[in-house]
Image (tube, rainbow, N blue to C red):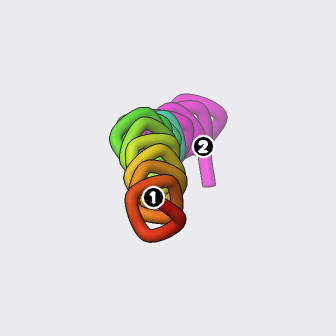
Amino acid sequence: MNPYSEAQSLLIRARELMDRAGDTLVAAQIELPLESLDRRLQAEAGDVARG
């Protein structure tokens, strides 16, 4: 494999990994606030149940 083709392959692979990392980050940014909201709702439900 010539160095240019190898460099091109590595660049494509790096872009794919960055895209996946971006998707993971977006998912985490969505999931964390939802977990926080869920905990708050559970706490409020517990408060209501206790009266």
- Please provide percent x and percent y for residue 6: 60, 43
- Residue 37 within the magenta-colored segment of the rendering: no
| Quadrant of res 14 | top right
Task: Answer few, some or many: residues within 10 Å of disc 1's Cα (few below 14, many 20 plus, some between 14 and 19).
Answer: few
Kindly identify the residue that appears in the image at 59 percent across and 41 percent down.
10
The numbered disc on residue 51 is 1
Q: Which residues, given as a range, are shown in magenta? A: 1-16
Q: Which residue lies most toward the front here?
A: 51
Kindly identify the residue that appears in the image at 59 percent across and 32 percent down.
7
Kindly identify the residue that appears in the image at 43 percent across and 33 percent down.
29
The numbered disc on residue 30 is none
- Residue 2 within the magenta-colored segment of the rendering: yes
Q: Amino acid at mark 1?
A: Gly
Q: State left or right for residue 4 relative to residue 51.
A: right
Query: Is residue 22 among the parts visible in the rendering?
Result: no
**Pair 2/1: label in front:** 1
Task: Answer few, some or many: residues within 10 Å of disc 2's Cα (few below 14, many 20 plus, some between 14 and 19).
Answer: few
Q: Name the residue tied to disc 2.
A: 6
- Viewer-proximal residue, 27 or 23? 27
Q: Between marks 2 and 1, how big is the CA–CA gap?
A: 67 Å
- Please provide percent x and percent y for residue 30: 34, 40
